[in-house]
Structures are given as C-alpha cells and as structure tokens.
Amino acid sequence: MSLKCEEVFFENYGQQPEGITFSPYRICPIGAHSDHNLGKITGLAIDQGIHLAYRAKRNGVVEMRSLQFPKRAQWFIRETGDKTGDWADYLRGATWALNKVYPLNVGLCGVIEGSLPIGGLSSSAAVILAFLVALCKVNKIRLTDQELIDIAFDAEKNYVGMNIGTLDQSCEVLSRKDHLLYLDCKDNSYELIAAPAAMKPYRIAIFFSGLEHSLAASRYNMRVDELRAGAYALQAFSGMDYGKFQEANARDVDYEIYLRYKDKLPENWRKRCEHWYSEFRRVEKGAEAWRRGDIEEYGRLSFESGWSSIHNWESGAPEQIRLYEIMKETDGIYGGRFSGAGFKGCCMALIDPEKTGAIAEKVERSYLDSFPEMKGKYSFHLCESADGIGADL
C-alpha cells in the first residue's frame, strides 16, 4: 500500500525514500495521570500511528516536513539550537537527546504522516520515536528498548518541557498485539499479559471530539505540579525526610500517610492525590481482571478512571465529558475514558465487535445532538491492538 508520505517525499526530492519507520499510537484504559509520579499503568499500542519516509543526508542537515502542519523545519545534526515553538520541537528534542548519548554525523530528510486526527493518542511520543528510529538507522546506531524509551522521554521532558512520565513511550515501544502492558514506572519493570482465550472479543474504538489537542497549551503541567505539591506537603506533615520539590513523588508517600493527613491539604492538592492513589489501586485490580479474562471488570475500572479524571484530576473539555457520558450509556461498550491529558482530543473505549455499528451510530447521534457544531469534525475509528515499535528494532 502506497503511503501519502512516500508520494510527497518523491514529489519533493525526486527519488524514493530509503526507508519508512512506523510508531503506533497508544491507549491507556487505566493508569492515567500516574506515570509522572512513578505510578503503575496498563496500556495497549494500536494499529494506527505515525509513518516517516526518509533518506540519509551526509552533510549532517536534518530537513523535515509534516503532512499535518505547515512549514518545513531544518537544523544541523549537532547544532539543534533552542526550541522555536513549532511542531518540529519534538524532533529537535529527539536530535538533542540522542546526540548526548551517541554523537551523530548523518542527517536525514523526511516526511511525516499521521493516520488519525491529532489529540489524545500520544502522537507527540509516536513522532519522536519514529524519528529516533530513522535517525539511528542512518547513523548505524542500535538502541535497546529501554534506551529508546529513555531518549524519547528526555526529549519531551527536558527539551520540549512537558512534565511527563514514561507511559507513552513505554506503550509505543514495548506493547505486543493482544497483550496488555502492565508497567511499574518506578523501576520500569513490566509484564505483557496475554488476553486469555476465554476473554470475550474486543476492539478499540476511538471517538474524536473534533477539538484539536495541545499538551503544551493545556493545564497538564499545572495538574502535575499540584499533585507533586500534595506529595511534598504529606512528606512534611508526616515527618518524612524530603529534598527538592521536583524530587517529591506520590509513590514515595504511603497511602496510609495520605489518609491520615489528606484533610490538611488544600482542596486541589487533595483531589490530585485522591486521583493518583485511587488510580494506583485501579491499575492493580485491572491487571488482575485482564489476567482472568474479565474484560467487563477491566472496562468498569476504566470507566471509574474516567470519572476520577473528571472529578479529581479535573480534566476534560465539555465535549469530552459528554462523550464519556454517552459511552457509559451505550450498550456494547465494556469501558473507556479520555485518552491523553484529557483537556481536548478524544475518548477511547473497549467494545464488543458485534455491536460496532450500533455503537458508532448511537455515540455520533447523541454527541452531535449535544454539539451540532462538531458535525464534520467529529469522527469514529475502529482499531486493534498492535506491536510496539520495539518489535521492529
């Protein structure tokens, strides 16, 4: 199958690309807003994502185009420079982060194509990973899965400036088709839990609200800081040793300490902590439900996660909240929640494949009744679980 990025590459450079990399998007049914404070997550890669067509440039120049954003971006492989606030900052950050570990000599020209609308499926991490793999191939560098995760994380956190954890990168690298990734972000240990033969069949539904999504423009960083402030205060109230604010993590504060001192916290800090601690327990229960093949229980916990994101993490645009409410009322949906930071973008759900048509019709009709201005912008996509990019390294 010919990809649009291949066609545009040939139109721009007069030759075929020498390679194409693919990084999948991801969903996190349970474990949202947890990884940045060393929590646990469950996730799946999906069979949609980012394709990057590329060729090496021996002069050390990086020249990138995106089919989703205007303007070509260009920089030298060893002189990334400061971020400029455009879409290519994620790629500049990837160049910067990789160059710290493996000095680079060969640049590349490339064209990026995303297979779904932007918002909520961690397209930023997928772009970084697809680009990193291409950059490694032209420079003849082989990374382990963990190196790939760590370098992509470094790029987004320390160059772009997002207070992220490793959920996105880990799901998009480590996932395997028909397996649930169960990851502990404290020590990066993980398990791939196969869907038991007795589990009811499922597909992954993506409902795009029609709102464009930008983590950098959202309240994402503020929410993370509020959680960290709560953990920092709990350490102080309980007499624990504590250091710098940025080193505080909810994972380092026992749940019993939270219960003892939570009423001393400002309301916003308490709510963020309540989400984190309750989500930690939901992830553990969800992993066991999946192991048993109980997708109804796993889905119920995902709906609970969505409720906590609305009421405790206080995320979700009105459009997303309405989608979540409709999903809960729709027969054949096992469970679901916002996907991504949850301020704009999409909702995801695990659904009964036999009821796909009725689900798609019900959700669209109900959503557009509430937000008729989203007609032509709202969209439904049916996906399957997939291998992460690490499977191809």
Image (cartoon, rainbow, N blue to C red):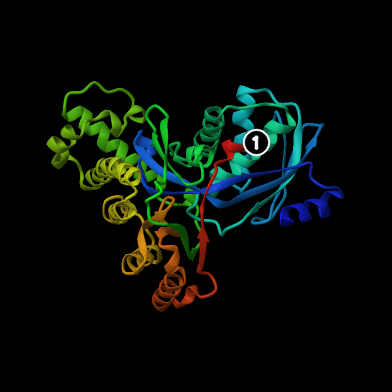
* Residue 181 drawn above or below residue 244: below
Identify which residue, 364 or 226, lies in the foreground.
364
Q: Residue at x 32, y 66 (%)?
A: 325
Left or right, residue 40 beside residue 152: left
* Residue 261 drawn above or below residue 305: above
Identify which residue, 173 or 220, lies in the foreground.
173
From this viewpoint, is residue 55 visible?
yes
Identify which residue, 174 or 130, lies in the foreground.
174
* Position of the N terminus by quadrant: bottom right
Left or right, residue 294 beside residue 104: left
Residue located farthest toward the right when viewing the structure as drawn: 14
Q: Residue at x 38, y 56 (%)?
A: 200
Instruction: Estimate the x, y position of residue 254 in percent, counting from the top left.
Output: 21, 31
Count neighbours of disc 1 (C-alpha within 10 A) and say few if under 14, some if 14 to 19, many if 20 or more.
Answer: many
Q: Which residue is mark 1?
A: 133
Q: Residue at x 61, y 23 (%)?
A: 101
Residue located farthest toward the front when viewing the structure as drawn: 197
Instruction: Estimate the x, y position of residue 80 in percent, counting from the top left.
Output: 67, 33
Instruction: Estimate the x, y position of residue 119 in percent, counting from the top left.
Output: 50, 56
Mark 1 lies on a secondary structure that is helix
From this viewpoint, is residue 83 visible?
no
* Position of the C terminus by quadrant: top right
